[in-house]
Amino acid sequence: MEQTFVILKPSTIQRSLIGDVITRYQRKGLIVTGIKMMQLDEKILREHYAHLVDRPFFPSLVDSMTRTPVIVMVLKGKDAVEVVRAMTGATNCRKAAPGTIRGDFGMSGQENIVHASDSPENAVIEINRFFKPEEIFDYPMPTFNAIYAPDEQ
Ligand code: UDP
Ligand code: MG
């Protein structure tokens, strides 16, 4: 089953929203297969946000993403990348639809609560960038047969 990569950004940590955000993923039926707190630095952010390094806001983005430790997560589910991106909402929280995480919890374009992988290919790259293989777990979920029909598993 597909896995995707999420960062709970410093805005989430400082606003005490860690539990609220993780609860949204768990209620949806996504399975947490990896989770840890870590301090990001400019080096890893230049890789992770390589598509943005030349943008004028990049220094501000680095300041924002290094302000506190973050929580990085791997979530597993059918079509997990697409599902989690849909739950995330538009980049600017003020434009994000109500019901999405950004739409419900934020007011900023930069301080936008979470990162989520935007394609299955990038999910694999990002999981490998932030997690060692032994930090990802496969374990039985008693609720699995209530979350998915047999032909979806
Ligand atoms: N960002 C920003 N200003 C912008 C565009 C992006 O501060 O004009 C920040 C924002 O925190 C965003 C991150 O850079 O989440 C990565 O941008 P991307 O376009 O990949 O958006 P995302 O995939 O996070 O929706
Ligand atoms: Mg992106």
Image (cartoon, grey):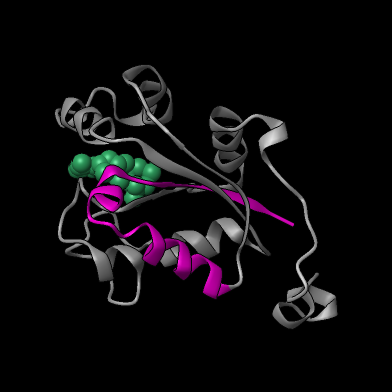
Q: Residue at x 68, y 64 (%)?
A: 78
24 in the magenta segment: yes
Q: Percent from the top left, x then y, of residue 12?
A: 29, 52
Instruction: Tell whether position 140 is magenta.
Output: no
The quadrant holding residue 144 is bottom right
Of residues 68 and 122, the one nearer the viewer is 68
The spot of residue 84 in percent (x, y) is 50, 61
Q: How many marks?
A: 0
Q: Report the side of 51 relative to 149 (left or right).
A: left
Query: At x 56% / y 55%, what residue is drawn?
Result: 81
Task: Give the magenta-colored segment's residue range.
Answer: 1-28
- Residue, far top: 43
Residue 98 lies, with reference to residue 39, above or below; the image says: below
Query: In the image, residue 77 lies at what x, y percent?
Result: 66, 62
Q: Is residue 50 above or below residue 152?
A: above
- Position of residue 43 relative to residue 34, above or below, is above
Q: Residue at x 60, y 59 (%)?
A: 80
